[in-house]
Image: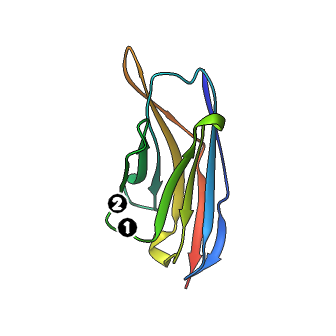
């Protein structure tokens, strides 16, 4: 079993910052990557940022230069620092952990709401 606990969402004005955290616990092994996805009302869930077990990072074009993903391996925790937030960043943000089991297996957090007011 794998549990993901997210924190750090909230309401912020445009131009502000938030930091999301996601702590993973349980059977964490054969980790491929950890990341953040988001889903706005009426839209599909999309990848925001990811960090591989080797430390390589990737970002959606819409957040490059504003968001930074990082990871604390000792704590199995992934962070998303979000700066210069825009109203279009408003969404529910989901933590994702991808591991190699019998095939690739994705685990998801419960989601945390981020609302950016204009």
Left or right, 32 with reference to 28: left
Position of 95 relative to 103 (above/below): below
The residue sitting at 56% across, 24% down in the picture is 28
Q: Position of residue 63 (x, y in %)?
A: 40, 67
Left or right, 31 with reference to 80: left
Residue topped by disc 2: 60
Q: Quadrant of residue 115?
A: bottom right
Give the residue at the far left of this rendering.
61
Position of 114 relative to 2 (above/below): below
Q: Position of residue 76 (x, y in %)?
A: 61, 36
Quadrant (top left, top right, bottom left, bottom right) of the N terminus: top right
The front one of 86 and 110 is 86
Left or right, 75 with reference to 107: right
Quadrant (top left, top right, bottom left, bottom right) of the C terminus: bottom right
Q: Position of residue 33 (x, y in %)?
A: 43, 37
Left or right, 40 with reference to 17: left
| Residue at disc 1, secondary structure | loop
- Label 2, label 1: how many angstroms apart (C-alpha)? 6 Å
The front one of 9 and 32 is 32
Position of 109 relative to 12 (above/below): above
The residue sitting at 64% across, 75% down in the picture is 12
Q: Position of residue 16 (x, y in %)?
A: 60, 78
| Residue at disc 2, secondary structure | loop
For the residues bearing labels 2 and 1, Cβ distance under 8 angstroms: yes
Residue topped by disc 1: 64
The residue sitting at 54% across, 67% down in the picture is 82
Q: How many marks?
A: 2
Q: According to the image, what is the colour scheme of the structure?
A: rainbow
The front one of 86 and 78 is 78
Give the residue at the far bottom of this rendering.
118
Mark 2 neighbour density, 10 Å: few (under 14) some (14–19) many (20 or more): few
């Amino acid at each position: 079993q794998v549990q993901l606990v997210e924190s750090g969402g909230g309401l912020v004005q445009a131009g502000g910052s938030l930091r999301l955290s996601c702590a993973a616990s349980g059977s964490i092994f054969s980790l491929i990557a950890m990341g953040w996805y988001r889903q706005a009302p009426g839209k599909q869930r999309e990848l925001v940022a990811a960090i591989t077990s080797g430390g390589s990072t990737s970002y959606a074009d819409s957040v490059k230069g504003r968001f930074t993903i990082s990871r604390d391996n000792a704590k199995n925790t992934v962070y998303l620092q979000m700066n210069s937030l825009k109203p279009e960043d408003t969404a529910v943000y989901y933590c994702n952990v991808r591991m190699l089991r019998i095939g690739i297996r994705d685990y998801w957090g419960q989601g945390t709401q981020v609302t950016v007011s204009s």
